[in-house]
Structure formats: C-alpha cells, structure tokens
Image: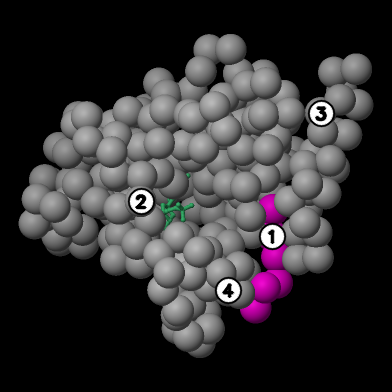
Amino acid sequence: MIVTIDGPAGVGKSTVAKLLAKALGIMYLDTGATYRSLAYAATQANVNPVTDVKQLIAMAKKLPLHLQQTDEGELQVFLDGREVTKQIRTEEVSEAAAQVSQHTDIRAAMVELQRRLADKHGVVVEGRDTGSVVFPYAPYKFFLDANPAIRARRRQEELALVYGRETPLQQVQEQLHFRDSLDRTRRVGPLVRPEGAIAIDTSHLAAPEVVRVMLEHVRSRTG
Ligand code: DC
C-alpha cells in the first residue's frame, strides 16, 4: 500500500498525510523533511546551499537521517542522533531547502533515501514529486492545491503556532511565491500533477474532510 500526496507548500499535505496514515494504519513519510534536514546540516556546516554543490552532494549521499513517529503520529527528525524536528522548520531552512532541492544529483540521492525510508508494510508519502518520480507506480495518488492567499494564511498561522512568531502576510506570500516558482520550474522532479493523481482543492475543506474524500477513493478500490 503506497499512497502519494503531492502539492505546493501550504495546501495541508502534512496534516492530511498524517491523518490518512493513521486511518489506514500505515507509516507517514514527509519527503520535505529529507530536503530540510540536508539544508539544515549544510547551514550548520557552513556549506552554501546554492554554490557548494559538490559538498552538498557528498552530504546528501550519506545523510545520517533517522525519522521516527510518535504514538500521536507526529514525525520526529534526528540527524546524527540529535533531534532537529523544530530546527528544520524555520524560514531560513525553508529557503535553503528550496535551493538544495534544485540540484539533479542531490535529488537523486534524496529519492534513494526516501525509498529506503518507506516502510515495507505501506506508507503515505507526501512532497512534490512522490507520485511522479519517487513512487510512479503507487496505486493511489493525490494532488492537493489551494488558493494562494489561503495557503499564505495557513503558513502564517503555522509560523505563529510553532515559533510564536508573527510574520506579515505580505512577507509569507512573497516567500511562498518564491518557493512555488522554484518548485514548478526546476528541470528534475518539478511540482506537477502526477499521471493518474486525483486532484483535490483544499481551499475550503478542513483536513478531516480531505481525508474522508481520500479514504473514499482508496476504499472504493480496495473494498
Ligand atoms: O514540503 P516542505 O515545505 O517541507 O519542503 C521543503 C522543500 O523541499 C521545498 O522547498 C521543496 C522541496 N521538496 C522537493 O523538492 N521535493 C519533495 N518531494 C519534497 C520537498
């Protein structure tokens, strides 16, 4: 059982993927966390996420990443045994992750890592290219999208909730726009609606409603 969920930042992929994984009793894999962890490791090692490509590739190939799920379904991220769950979610790391994910060889190493991290017993995996590149033969694929203003507001709320930081909406919108253009225009693994993916507009749907729609699709095919 592999379920892929792709879409731009701020459409609610993580929330939905966690809930769906719980409902199906399988693991949840956040592929963005792999790029974020690499970006965080690079910033810690003073490796430039845009220019130090050789070093980034070497780091990507042996990234000491360990993901663990709590009983509540939350993902805990460990780098070299040290928990970095919160550290990889800052705006600085978001931007560095958007940069490191542009390089072809880095993506190849990350895709390999993601396939290794996927549980043999089934996984709900979310990201940008999970249905098109990481698991193109997945039997269940979804593509989430939402109105840009709503996505920005969700991201703004997340920043306030996780970091207690008030960020002007205009600034969040600009950051999302920047990441969108990088995601959609890169040569390898761009953000696309994968072939065979069911599209869901989450602008006016709460996460449990999105999950209900997904479960209906999955169950209609598995009985
Ligand atoms: O989903 P996220 O915001 O945590 O992703 C962080 C960055 O990683 C984002 O800029 C896009 C990139 N990414 C990617 O290129 N491919 C994926 N499958 C997942 C994330």
Q: CA distance from mark 1 to mark 3?
A: 19 Å
| Span of residues in magenta | 144-150
- Counting from the top left corner in percent of width and height, residue 49 is at 21, 58
Magenta region includes residue 148: yes
- Closer to the camera: disc 4 or disc 3? 4
**Pointer 4 or 3: first along the chain:** 4
Q: Amino acid at mark 4?
A: Ala
On the image, which quarter does residue 98 sit in? bottom left
Vertical relation: 7 (above or below) 133: below
On the image, which quarter does residue 4 sit in? top right
- Counting from the top left corner in percent of width and height, residue 22 is at 67, 29
Categorize mark 2 by other alpha carbons within 10 Å: few (<14), some (14-19), many (20+). Answer: few
- Closer to the camera: disc 2 or disc 3? 2
Q: Tell me if I can see residue 61 in this picture.
A: no
Residue occupied by mark 1: 145
Categorize mark 4 by other alpha carbons within 10 Å: few (<14), some (14-19), many (20+). Answer: many
Which disc number belongs to residue 218? 3
Categorize mark 3 by other alpha carbons within 10 Å: few (<14), some (14-19), many (20+). Answer: some
Categorize mark 1 by other alpha carbons within 10 Å: few (<14), some (14-19), many (20+). Answer: many
- Counting from the top left corner in percent of width and height, residue 188 is at 42, 48
* Residue that lies at the very extreme toward the left in this rendered image: 46
Q: Amino acid at mark 1?
A: Asp
Determine the residue positioned at 49% across, 30% down: 70
Position of the C terminus by quadrant: top right
Q: Label 2, secondary structure: give it.
A: loop
Which disc number belongs to residue 86? 2
Q: Amino acid at mark 2?
A: Lys
Q: CA distance from mark 4 to mark 2?
A: 20 Å
- Closer to the camera: disc 2 or disc 1? 2
Determine the residue positioned at 43% across, 69% down: 164
Q: CA distance from mark 1 to mark 4?
A: 12 Å
